Amino acid sequence: MIRYIRWCAYFCVLLLAALQVNLVRIQVWEAAALDANPANKRGAVERYARPRGDILVDGRPVTGSRDSRQLLRYERTYRDGPLYAPVTGFSSQTYGTSFLERAEDDVLAGTAPALAAFPLWHDLARSRPAGGRAVTTVRAGVQSAAYAGLAGKRGAVAALEPATGRILALVSSPSYDPGELSGTGSAVEDAWARLNADPDRPMLNRALRETYPPGSTFKIVTAAAALDAGVVTDVDAPTRTPDPYLLPGTRTPLPNASTGCEDASMAEAVQWSCNTVMARIGVRVGLRGMVEAAERFGFNDSGLRVPAWVSRSNFDTDMSPDQLALSAIGQFNTTATPLQMAMVAAAVANGGEIARPRLVERTTRRDGTQVKGGVRGSLGRAMNPATALRLQELMVKVVDEGTGRNAAVPGAVVGGKTGTAQHGVGNAGIPYAWFIGWARAEDAPVPAVAVAVVVEDAAARRGDISGNGAAAPIARAVMQAALSADRYPAP
Amino acid sequence: MTALTAKVADSAPSPGASHPRRRGAELTLLAGAVLVSVLGHLYAGVATSGRIPEQSARYAAGLAVAALLAHLAVRLFAPYADPLVLPIAVLLNGLGLVLIRRLDLTTPGHAAADAQLLWSGLGVVLFVLVLVVLRDHRVLQRYAYLSVVAALTLMLVPVFFPAVNGAHIWVRFAGLSFQPGEFAKILLAVFFATYLAANRTALALTGRRIRRLRLRLLPGRVLGPILAIWLLSVGVLVLERDLGTSLLFFGLFVIMLFTATGRIGWIAVGLLLAGLGAYAVGTFEPHVHSRVEDWLNPFASIERGQGPGQLAQSLFAFGAGGLLGAGLGHGRSFLIGFAAKSDFILATAGEELGLAGVTAILALYALLVARGFRAGLALRDPFGRLLATGLASIVALQVFVIAGGVTGLIPLTGMAMPFLAQGGSSVVTNWIIVALLVRLSDSARRPGAGPEPDPWARTRTRSTRTRGTRTRTDIRPPEPEATA
């Protein structure tokens, strides 16, 4: 019987050994797959167990957290949700995150390794650091001015500090309240469905993710390309351009919206926005030169992050001369995001170099100690400094006595360019109104702000007038706010 | 786990160390067990609420008093008992209370820890009572037939009570509910041991031989009653839909029959029959069929869009624990929902203590089972040997059935993890099992008992090989070769 008892003991050992092997399988081998299973709520429960870190504008949180007393405990709240929605994006327990909430998620949620002052301690104590904060470069005054300017219209504003690349305002209109999407349940699902079905697309961040034909504002790029390539050496010399101008290789005449463009100089062409002159200059620069110039300004780059990703602005690399002529005046299939056009203005304002646009000044722990500081980056030189100076003069003329007089700010030097982009098949749609510009306080050495404003469906009959009528006043308000905010810098 | 085999095999005595009582060692281990449990309790409290829980003093005192009482009873009434058995039981019970108390915090309004503490206290009282009343385990043989009648009655009673969660295994009375089937397993073990001990010669040596199959049929006259009772008990359980316990009884029956007769062929036949039965039940009985389906594909409900089932949640919990666990109070095993404190208690251990913690718990069970088998090996009377084997097997099988169920090794059948899981009747029953093991090990190690009747040649050769490294307590009296 002793032998049989031993066998039974061995059998029991076998059973327990099988359990042990299976435990190793689950807890070590398959643990990662089990953790990653979408039905496993642990990640979500853990994620929302503590208040999420805040996003700050001008030193004040524009976000908050609310204890919902449910399984997913803390829900996101937004102060002035629609105003800052293009900056913050949403943080939803149902639909994930977007924009800054997404780009800085690891800091805000407290999972970034850098948040732990003593990483080993958190490992040992099995605690997690509190969610950190993202301090934005946005200035509340500039943002509000842009938002107020776009009220009731569809459009977007992007404003930059040319020297540093700080994004001062990022506005998309109409907007939405991201707080509606924070929690779970049918109310959130209804809001999501309603916002997505809305024909005005309020959740579309037009400043970063929508591309528009830039129209005449693109003439700044063409002018820079011509000056850098030496195609135009004297901006005041007549260009001997007929009006209308026959697109090369076709019998299609290109008209002007304004008069006095026949044989105009490039300075006059920028000032009065002559399509004929600039189209012809673009053709003379050539496809390769135009593509290179556009790409130096940031076109055809799909990798830009601010840190939310930015849609690619397009300048075709394979075009016939007539298509190139249209592209040189921002038509055909040239498209740009408002941020891209703000970068064009900023390049001119900053002496030709483009500072990498960024939305996050720094990230901090909950107590305010810095985790990561925003570093000024450069996207390289878009044009020679001399070219930039020349273009600054031309743009100032646009505002002083040209098509963009509505953008003038008292006490400041303002340069700008209006634009009206063609829209729809055969230009049948109502055009977009554009204004890009920059402003420098008279006593300041460098421009403090560069801005791009686009207003969709501006009711305009005639080309560039609408840029001055619909977009320039908004740009003026934004630049004014930026100049006054500049005197009282944010903490 | 390999340590278990080593310990079972390596049971030769050390020279000169005759019959140590080792009660001091037991007391030290008990203190350690109580300390571990109280620290676990405090840690879980601090981790979940940030402060020391109010009932800490009560909990610590209750556990310490219970452990001390049990120890005194062993010291007075079973002085030669194995010093490991009681501390293991106290540690497992203490850990169970920690886990249940911790889960109580996530289910306000459904506190279970206080009731469990009360039942554990009752268990310890019964432990003491068994030791006081039952001075010689062989007395139990007199009550074999009474046991079997009682066992069948206990199993039949719940049929007349309303089903809870699909199983007729509960008796509700005066606000308390318990599972009589839990007690029945001890009674059946006693009956099987008695009957097989009395008839093992007949079972082993008589019966018609079928040469072609190299099998010897068991004599019907002897096998008949035991088979009938076993069938009856299993039948009742199937009616009650308590399949975990059916599996346990079947395993117990096969193991004890094998121990008594040594006929491996019958084990094969038994397993074959069990396999067929399990297949039939798993295919045709909807309740069981769904369990089998869950086992085959635990994530099927997720794919159907119905969210994770209990087994999937349990697997998530184990996976979340990983190697070292989330820490007591830091897990989310409450997501399992229903039965998190009872059948699925091991998942909480897996999540919060990790693979390391669950391995330790399994090692404790393995050690408890090993000490049971060891008592069986050292005992001299067939009844004692069979009873010890049966009781140790009950613990091992129970652990396997439920731990295998919640980890997806075998289809899930409801059963309590011994000592850990919430459930009064289970805790009380396990305390009685431990009391019987203590009594059996005391008999095995008591000096002045007669010489071992069974030859033990294999152990002797091993003992000479491993003599140099032996440091443990020994069960058996010194053998002539060892002292020479």
Image: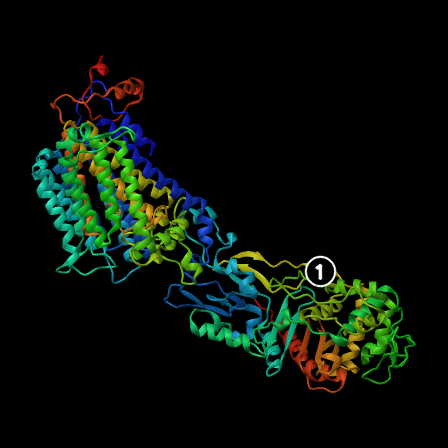
Q: Residue at x 72, y 63 (%)?
A: A300
For the residue pair A393 and B290, the one nearer the viewer reads as: B290
Q: Residue at x 78, y 75 (%)?
A: A395
Q: Is residue A41 above or below residue B39?
A: below
Q: Position of residue B123 (x, y in %)?
A: 16, 46
Q: How many marks?
A: 1
Q: Residue at x 66, y 77 (%)?
A: A480
Q: Residues within 10 Å of mark 1 (few under 14, many from 20)?
A: some
Q: Position of residue A488 (x, y in %)?
A: 60, 71
User: In this view, which residue lies farthest toward the top?
Assistant: B484
Q: Chain of mark 1?
A: A
Amino acid tagged 1: Leu
Q: Position of residue A360 (x, y in %)?
A: 59, 63
User: What residue did someone put label 1 on?
Assistant: A379
Q: Quadrant of residue B381?
A: top left
Question: Quick one: quadrant of the N terminus of chain A?
Answer: top left
Q: Residue at x 8, y 40 (%)?
A: B143
Q: Name the secondary structure under disc 1.
A: strand
> What colouring style does the render use?
rainbow
For the residue pair A444 and B45, the one nearer the viewer reads as: B45
Q: Position of residue B1 (x, y in %)?
A: 33, 34
Q: Is residue A432 left or right of residue A283?
A: left
